[in-house]
C-alpha cells in the first residue's frame, strides 16, 4: 500500500527519507514541490532521478482533474467540479470579495448528516477526504484561476467535524510557512454542531472562525430539518458555542438558512433573538438556495426583512448573505448532484 505523501508534514517526510537511507534535507524541497502544485515526482527537477523512482514505489501524490468549471457572468464566482484519484467527484467555489479571494472547499465525498434542505447529503456519505485532498482544492483552484487565495471556508460538501483528524491535519498543513501559509484567522469551519467535536476543537485554541449551522432556535423546528439535532438539542449547541468563545475568544458565526414557512416566522425570530441576546456572535441569514429534489423554498424578501429587523432590535449583529454564483449552481453539492444524476440517466 502506497502512502499519501502530500498529507505528511515535512518532519514526517524527513523521517521517511532517513529510513530510506537518503539525506533528510530533501524533505523540505519535496514538501515545497508538493504544496506548489507538483502533480508527480518527475516534476521535482532538483531531486535525483534515482530518488524520484524510490519515492514512486512508496508514495502517491493526489492531484485532481477538472471535470467542469463554471464562471458566473454576474460576479466572477468560479465553481470547480473535481475528479479525485478514485473517480469520485467533489466541488469547490472561488468567490471574489473586496478583501480578497475566498475558496469554499468540501471536506467529504457526500455527507451523512441528512439536513432536509441540503443537496450534499442526498446520496449519503461515500468517504472522507484525505488531508491532501483538502489542500488540493485550495492549491489547484489558485493555480487554475491565477487568483491568489487568501481565505478558506470549510463550507462545501460534507461535515468537517465528521472527518476530524484529517481536517485538523489539513489546517496545520495549509498553515505551514513552506506550504500555502494561510493563517488560521483567514479560515472558517462550518459545522452542523457535533458537540463532542466542537468541544474538542475548543481545546486546540486555534484562531479559527467557527460557523455554526443553527437554522432554528427551537428543537421542534431544528430536529425537523436537521436530524443531528435529535442527538443534542439547540440549547446544548448554544452552550458548546459559548464554551468555544470562552476558550478561544473568537466570536461565533451562526448560519441561518431562511426557509419559507418553516423557520422564518415572527415566533422563530423572537425566540432566536432571546436565545442569542448577550452572546458575542454574528448571525448570517442566507435565503435558501433552491434544491431541485426538495420541496423547501426560500423566504420572501419581506419575511427576510422582518426577521432581520427583529434581530437587530435586540442588538444582534446580523447580515443577509449576498448570493454569489446563483447562475452557476454555486451552492452546496448542486453540481456534484447534477453530475451524478446525469451519469445515471
Ligand atoms: N456540514 C457543514 C458544512 C457544509 S454546509 C455544516 O452543516 O455547516 C455549509 C452551509 O450551507 C451550512 O450552513 C448549511 O446548512 C448551508 N446550506 C446547505 N444547503 C443549503 C441551501 N440549500 N440553502 C442555503 N444554505 C444551505
Image: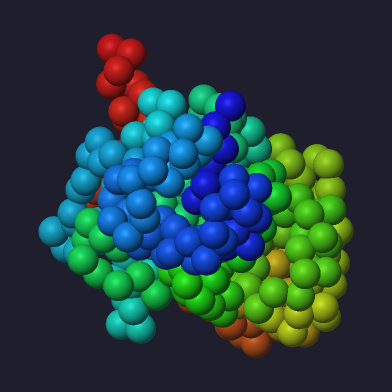
Quarter of the N terminus within the rendering: top right
- Taking depth in this image into account, of 104 and 127 the one nearest to the observer is 127
Kindly give the residue lying farthest to the left in the view shown: 73
Q: Position of residue 175 (x, y in %)?
A: 54, 71
Report the number of numbered marks.
Answer: 0
Residue 206 seen in the figure: yes
At horizontal 39% and vertical 26% (from top left) the residue drawn is: 87
- Taking depth in this image into account, of 19 and 37 the one nearest to the observer is 19
At horizontal 54% and vertical 59% (from top left) the residue drawn is: 23
At horizontal 83% and vertical 41% (from top left) the residue drawn is: 231
Up-down: is 343 above or below 165? above
Q: Is residue 203 left or right of residue 317?
A: right
Q: Is residue 198 left or right of residue 46?
A: right
Q: Position of residue 57 (x, y in %)?
A: 48, 32
Q: Position of residue 67 (x, y in %)?
A: 25, 36
Which of the 4 image quadrants contains residue 168? bottom right
Quarter of the C terminus within the rendering: top left
Up-down: is 276 above or below 49? below
At horizontal 43% and vertical 26% (from top left) the residue drawn is: 86
Q: Position of residue 101 (x, y in %)?
A: 33, 72
Kindly give the residue lying farthest to the top in the view shown: 345
Which of the 4 image quadrants contains residue 9? bottom right
Up-down: is 25 above or below 250? above
Which of the 4 image quadrants contains residue 121? top right
Residue 116 seen in the figure: no
Amino acid at each position: 500500500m502506497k502512502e499519501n505523501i502530500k498529507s505528511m508534514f515535512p518532519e514526517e517526510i524527513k523521517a521517511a527519507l532517513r529510513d530510506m537511507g537518503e539525506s533528510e534535507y530533501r524533505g523540505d524541497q519535496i514538501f515545497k514541490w508538493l504544496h506548489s502544485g507538483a502533480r508527480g515526482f518527475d516534476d521535482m527537477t532538483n531531486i535525483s532521478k534515482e530518488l524520484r523512482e524510490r519515492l514512486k514505489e512508496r508514495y502517491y501524490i493526489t492531484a485532481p482533474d477538472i471535470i467542469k468549471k463554471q464562471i458566473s457572468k454576474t460576479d466572477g464566482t468560479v465553481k470547480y467540479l473535481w475528479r479525485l484519484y478514485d473517480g469520485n467527484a467533489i466541488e469547490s467555489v472561488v468567490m471574489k470579495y473586496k478583501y480578497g479571494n475566498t475558496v469554499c472547499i468540501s471536506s467529504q465525498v457526500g455527507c451523512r448528516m441528512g439536513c432536509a434542505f441540503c443537496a450534499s447529503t442526498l446520496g449519503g456519505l461515500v468517504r472522507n477526504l484525505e488531508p491532501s485532498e483538502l489542500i488540493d482544492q485550495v492549491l489547484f483552484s489558485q493555480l487554475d484561476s491565477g487568483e491568489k487565495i487568501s481565505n478558506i471556508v470549510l463550507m462545501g460538501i460534507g461535515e468537517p467535524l465528521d472527518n476530524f483528524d484529517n481536517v485538523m491535519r489539513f489546517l496545520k498543513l495549509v498553515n505551514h510557512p513552506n506550504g500555502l501559509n494561510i493563517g488560521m484567522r483567514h479560515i472558517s469551519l462550518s459545522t452542523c454542531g457535533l458537540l463532542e467535536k466542537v468541544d474538542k476543537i475548543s481545546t486546540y485554541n486555534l484562531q479559527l472562525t467557527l460557523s455554526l449551522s443553527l437554522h432554528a432556535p427551537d428543537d421542534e423546528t431544528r430536529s425537523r430539518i436537521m436530524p443531528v439535532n435529535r442527538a443534542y438539542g439547540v440549547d446544548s449547541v448554544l452552550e458548546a458555542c459559548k464554551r468555544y468563545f470562552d476558550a478561544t475568544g473568537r466570536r461565533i458565526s451562526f448560519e441561518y438558512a431562511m426557509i419559507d414557512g418553516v423557520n422564518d416566522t415572527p415566533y422563530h425570530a423572537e425566540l432566536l433573538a432571546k436565545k442569542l441576546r448577550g452572546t458575542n456572535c454574528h448571525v448570517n441569514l442566507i435565503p435558501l438556495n433552491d434544491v431541485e429534489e426538495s420541496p423547501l423554498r426560500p423566504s420572501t424578501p419581506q419575511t427576510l426583512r422582518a426577521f432581520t429587523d427583529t434581530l437587530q432590535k435586540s442588538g444582534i449583529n446580523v447580515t443577509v448573505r449576498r448570493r454569489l454564483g446563483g447562475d452557476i449552481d454555486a451552492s452546496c453539492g448542486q453540481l456534484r448532484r447534477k453530475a451524478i444524476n446525469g451519469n445515471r440517466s
